[in-house]
Amino acid sequence: MNTCQSNEKILLRSDKNGAAFLSLNRPDKLNTLSEAMLNALQRELDDIAADSTVQCVVISAEGRGFCAGHDLQEMRSHPEHSYYQELFRQCGKVMQSIVTLPVPVIAKVGGIAAAAGCQLVSSCDLVIAARSARFSVPGINVGLFCSTPAVALSRSISAKRAFDILLTGDVIDAETALDWGLLSSVVDDANLDEAVTDKVEEVLSKSPSAVRYGKSMFHSQRQMSLSDAYDFAGNVMAQNMMSHDAGEGIDAFLAKRTPTWEKPVR
């Protein structure tokens, strides 16, 4: 495993067999999204986006919480409108980079994911959470409606459920979050590592090119009308059919053998 660390270890990264693992590393601050953390995330996401050998990303966190949101102490030390505009623009860019990343992003969640931390969860493609995990957007309790987290949250769960917890600041447990569609799966705390490892290995076993076609197509078509989505998906699928892996996969299926996928190169 090759390991690199960025920004004084505020964000840890390791790479193994085509998967990139990013871990928020401010456990004493419940991994809040400070300016430095957002910058570190953006740098790594940009690097991953340009690296065709990465096939999957996992975002996790050190310590007892996943992410408690923005660093409120840092925010209060810069009481300027322009500062806040830039901070939320920067955070929005990180979230959009996750959505537009060419490969799937899995959130591995233990502990609390609150405010912008819940926004981070909502932005990931798959979310595997420990049974003890909790989720909230509690800005309303300090006089601040969680407007930017609302963008991601309302695209993950129903509008009425999203607005309810945005309006009340209520905390929901992992089972509720799963039922509402915020999570992909919930596992016992002791099984979280194993569940994430299994999901990563499952993704890595698939055709890298097909996964990339799928990630891009899936999010793009959600913003389209039904007829435009079918036109777009049909064109993407036709292009996918012309790839080496689609031909190899179909031939292998017909011949009842294991396919050999084309290995990505930088």
Image (cartoon, rainbow, N blue to C red):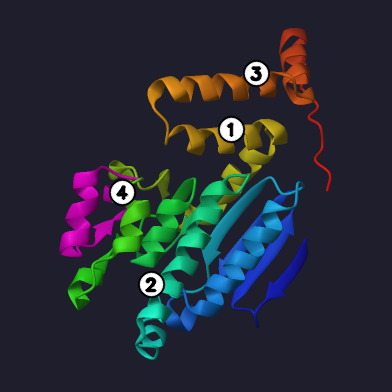
Q: Badges 2 and 3: C-beta atoms under 8 Å apart?
A: no
Mark 4 neighbour class, 10 Å CA radius: few under 14, some 14 to 19, many 20 or more: some
CA gap between label 1 and label 3 equals 12 Å
Residue type marked 3: Ala
**Residue at the image position 65 percent from the left and 42 percent from the top:** 201
| Secondary structure at numbered mark 1 | helix
Q: Which residue is drawn at 81% across and 32% down?
A: 262
The residue wearing badge 4 is 154
Looking at the rendered image, the disc whose residue lies closer to the viewer, 4 or 2, is: 4
Residue 249 is left or right of residue 136, and the answer is right
Tell me which segment is drawn in magenta. Answer: 156-176
Q: Does the magenta stretch include residue 162?
A: yes
Residue 214's tag is 1
Residue 180 is situated, as x and y percent measured from the top left of the image, at 28, 44
Mark with earlier residue (4, 2): 2
Question: Badge 2: how crowded within 10 Å, few (<14), some, or many (20+)?
Answer: many
Asked whether, in this view, residue 48 is left or right of residue 248, the answer is left
Q: Name the residue under label 2.
A: 68
**Residue position for label 3:** 238
Eyeballing the image, is 159 above or below 95? above
Mark 3 and mark 4 in contact (Cβ < 8 Å)? no
Q: Which of marks 1 and 3 is in front?
A: 3
| Helix, strand or loop for disc 4 | loop
